[in-house]
Amino acid sequence: MPDTAETVDRDEPGDRTGTATADSPAAPPVPVLSEPRDGTPPVITSQPALDRAVDALAEADGPVAVDAERASGYRYGQAAYLVQLRRGDGPTVLVDPVADLDLRALAQVLDGPEWVLHAASQDLPCLAALGLRPRELFDTELGARLAGLPRVGLAAVTEHYLGVGLAKEHSAVDWSTRPLKASWLAYAALDVELLLDVRDRLAADLDAQDKLAWAREEFAAVAAAPPPAPRVDPWRRTSGVHRLRTRRAQAVVRSLWEAREEHARRRDVAPGRVLPDSAIVAAATAQPRTLTALAELPVFSGPANRRLGRYWLDAISEALALPDDALPGPAPRGDGPPPPRLWSDRDPDAAARLARVRPALAGVAESVDLPVENLLTPDTARRLAWEPPQPADAAAVAAFLRDRGAREWQVALTTDVLVDALAGHAPS
């Protein structure tokens, strides 16, 4: 362990519980690592250096710790701007994917060993864009949820199993910056330095709880998950659009959203840095028709958006000129049931079923010490309660769950209690 250390007693996003309450004593602070034990390796930006790193990874044994850093909130899209790797007793490898590198040999050496990632679904898409894909993985964040840990951020999981924390103050920096700062690189190297040790301790914990097979099913599902389908009408996710009551105002949101998207894509800037959602909604509400009126709105009066004033006004004018039959219609209805708050009026029997299904699942989740959403997705539970198979016997319910993507361990744990709940039996 490095000599330099700080202390920390904070949680990370994604944790299930908070810190100590007034009724419980605060835990003593734990040492927080600030420097890798072997020092911070240089970032690989040349092909010879990458070739040497690939050889080192090939000579090492066992799983490989993998992490990636993106520039979310700064750049358009979710590209990786740094890839961190560590395998066995080999050195930590930091690869600059923006450099002109041929990554095919790296992909080949990584095609076989188990990958160890924390919150794998966040990093797998940007790694896949580089041609890097795992055959097998171990997700320490998902595993920690299954193990029943109350806090599942990487620093908290490392603290739980290894007794040390990780400094996380650089998690939201602009990783597209070049050159990358030394303190950022130390943070990045630490993210993989202890990940293999965490994986081993966590696997042993899951095995002791008879949950390791469950975890393997979950990890396989994450590795095999297809890329998410493009959203229908993504402009409808603009924050505050629900407050707009007219189709014309929604048309302005759509037009400005599309203009912002195009400008952000051209400049490779996060859309929210070009124009915040609040400014789009404000323009849709005011519907200005001149540059002077547009500049009177918040955000549009700033120097950057005053320079883009004609661009934004053209988008607004285009929406205002649309014929009625070209205005946005109602939001497309999803293929699932309506929001549960409407069930009592639309289908009281379904509402009653859901009122039994939810506590039944909560009871099972509590008995095996894991979050109920990891036992069965809320969407699956709602769909089952809204329109159960007929007859709702064990075979039909199990088939329903499998059709919705439930893993075998989830089917085994939940089928019987769901059959009872659908039949009208309150959970015991």
Image (tube, rainbow, N blue to C red):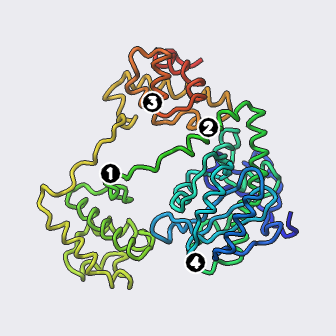
Looking at marks 3 and 2 on the same chain, the residue that comes earlier in the sequence is marked by 2
**What kind of element bears circle 1?**
loop
What amino acid does circle 1 point to?
A: Val
Q: Which residue is mark 4?
A: 177
Looking at marks 4 and 2 on the same chain, the residue that comes earlier in the sequence is marked by 4
Tell me whether the residue at label 4 lies in contact with that at label 3, contact meaning CB atoms closer than 8 angstroms: no
Can residue 174 be seen? no
What amino acid does circle 4 point to?
A: Thr
Q: Nearer the viewer, mark 3 or mark 2?
A: 3
373 is higher (above) or lower (below) than 134: above
Looking at marks 1 and 4 on the same chain, the residue that comes earlier in the sequence is marked by 4
Residue 14, disc? none
Q: Which residue is mark 3?
A: 403
**What kind of element bears circle 2?**
loop
What amino acid does circle 3 point to?
A: Asp
- Position of the C terminus, as image quadrant, is top right
Q: Position of residue 88 (x, y in %)?
A: 79, 55
Q: CA distance from mark 3 to mark 1?
A: 23 Å
Q: Which residue is mark 2?
A: 371
